[in-house]
Image (cartoon, rainbow, N blue to C red):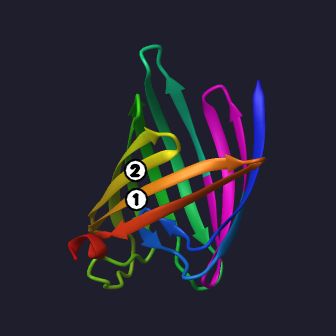
Amino acid sequence: LADWSANVGMVSDYHFRGVQQTQSASASAGVDYEQGGFYAGTWAAEVEDGLEVDFYAGYGIELDNGFSLGLGVTTYQYTGGFDTSYDELNLSAGFGIFGFEYTLGTHEDGITDDNEMVIGDADYSFTGISADLGKGFGATVGFFGKDWGGEYAEVTYGTSVGEFDVGVGLVMSGSDLDD
């Protein structure tokens, strides 16, 4: 049985994998399709100069023993002058309260961790480990590799108020963690 869903949202400060995307509020919206373990969707958000538009698809399963496994692809496209495109292969696994993500990506005309512009693609990896701490609390740590370096930590809390999901998070990037 196929399932369609849609979402709209607003954040006061948009971060992704510990990297600040806006210094002000950002609105977003998306549409998702799921059938069996297959999923596909698109999501868009306001960034400082234009829109970030994501397209993704993949397949995930949950085994009888409680393990979950996933494989997907994501592309991040930008309008305006905010950024260039990113293409990723995403691998995930989970068990109990723990989740694991490993991503291999390419950034068109990317920037290295030294903030040097690279003409041509920059390759990167991302490893993330998350935990559902219960009662709406969660935590994530993430690490970049290859042409990029850096790490971040995030603690979140989310709940529902009527028909709305609300949450708050504290994000500390590598420079914050080093201090």
Residue 86, percent from left and from top: 49, 65
Q: Earlier in the sequence, mark 1 or mark 2?
A: 2
User: Which of the 4 quarters of the picture holds residue 14?
Assistant: bottom right
Q: Which quarter of the image is occupied by the N terminus?
A: top right
Q: Which residue is mark 1?
A: 154
| Residue 169 visible within the image | yes
Q: Label 2's element?
A: strand
Q: Which residue is mark 2?
A: 139
Q: Neighbour class for label 2 at 10 Å: few (<14), some, many (≥20)?
A: some
What is the C-alpha distance between the residues marked 1 and 2? 6 Å
User: Magenta span: helix, strand or loop, mainly?
Assistant: strand
Residue ID at (42%, 56%)? 155
Q: Is residue 1 above or below residue 21?
A: above
Residue span colored magenta:
30-55
Left or right: 129, with 56 as reference point: left
Residue 40, percent from left and from top: 66, 43
